[in-house]
Amino acid sequence: EQIGTIKKEQKYQKALGLMDEGKYKEALTQYQKAASCATEDKERLSNAFYNAGNALYQEQDYQQSLEAYKQALKLNPKDEECRYNYALAKAKLKQQQQQQQNQQSNKEQKQDQQQQNQNQQQEQENNDQRQQQQQDNQMTEENAEQILDALLQDEKEVQERVKEQQMQNMKRRRVEKDW
């Protein structure tokens, strides 16, 4: 039993050393091992959960740190430091959730803005195309005059040919009647 107690203490001390070095994930593993070995020693188990909560807090896993602090407080309800850290983790979790919510909201607003911009751009392109088609379909005054002049010229030529044809027809008739 004394060897078991020494091993528990070694795991616990190793976890403390890892925390001091800033190796929170590794320390958490050691605290979990220490907690699994210290099932009968409530104070040691409470300390293991408390320190596991601290490691989780340092890793910014506030939800899990709250759970660890709860376990520690169940075993030692008078631990004011643990109660303080629980409140701190709870506040951090709320802040983290608010930030995530804000980020999501900002992301949605940004997507909405991009969609509006795309819609406006598409609408502008459609308007530009319509205007271009209208301009293409509209005749300039100069073009209209040129077309009108060409039609008048064609009309004159056709009238001249018709007159010539009529004159030739008349000459033939005269020649035929003159016998």
Image (spheres, rainbow, N blue to C red):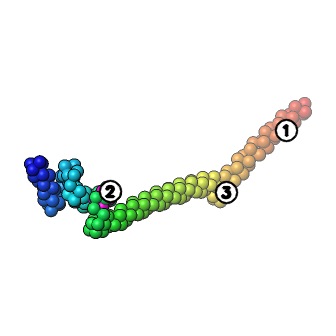
Specify few, some or many for label 3: CA neighbours under 10 Å numbering under 14, 14-19, or 20 or more.
few
Q: Which residues are magenta?
A: 69-73
Secondary structure of the residue carrying numbered label 3: helix
Q: Are marks 2 and 3 in contact (CB under 8 Å)?
A: no
Is 47 on the left-hand or right-hand side of 66? left
Specify few, some or many for label 2: CA neighbours under 10 Å numbering under 14, 14-19, or 20 or more.
some
Is 51 on the left-hand or right-hand side of 63? left
Secondary structure of the residue carrying numbered label 2: helix
| Residue hosting label 1 | 170
| Residue hosting label 3 | 145
- Foreground residue among 66 and 93: 66
Judged by depth in the image, the label closer to the viewer, 3 or 1, is: 3
- Foreground residue among 37 and 109: 37
- Sequence-first tag of 1 and 2: 2
**x and y percent of residue 178 in the render?**
90, 33
Secondary structure of the residue carrying numbered label 1: helix
Judged by depth in the image, the label closer to the viewer, 1 or 2, is: 2
Q: Residue at x 43, y 58 (%)?
A: 104
Instruction: Say which amino acid is labelled 2.
Output: Glu
- Sequence-first tag of 3 and 1: 3
- Foreground residue among 1 and 68: 1
User: How would you classify the magenta stretch by its main secondary structure?
Assistant: helix
| Residue hosting label 2 | 67
Q: Residue at x 9, y 48 (%)?
A: 3
The answer to whether residue 1 is magenta is no
Instruction: Say which amino acid is labelled 1.
Output: Met
Instruction: Say which amino acid is labelled 3.
Output: Glu
Give the distance between the C-alpha atoms of the residues marked 2 and 3, in whole angstroms. Answer: 89 Å
**x and y percent of residue 29 in the render?**
20, 51
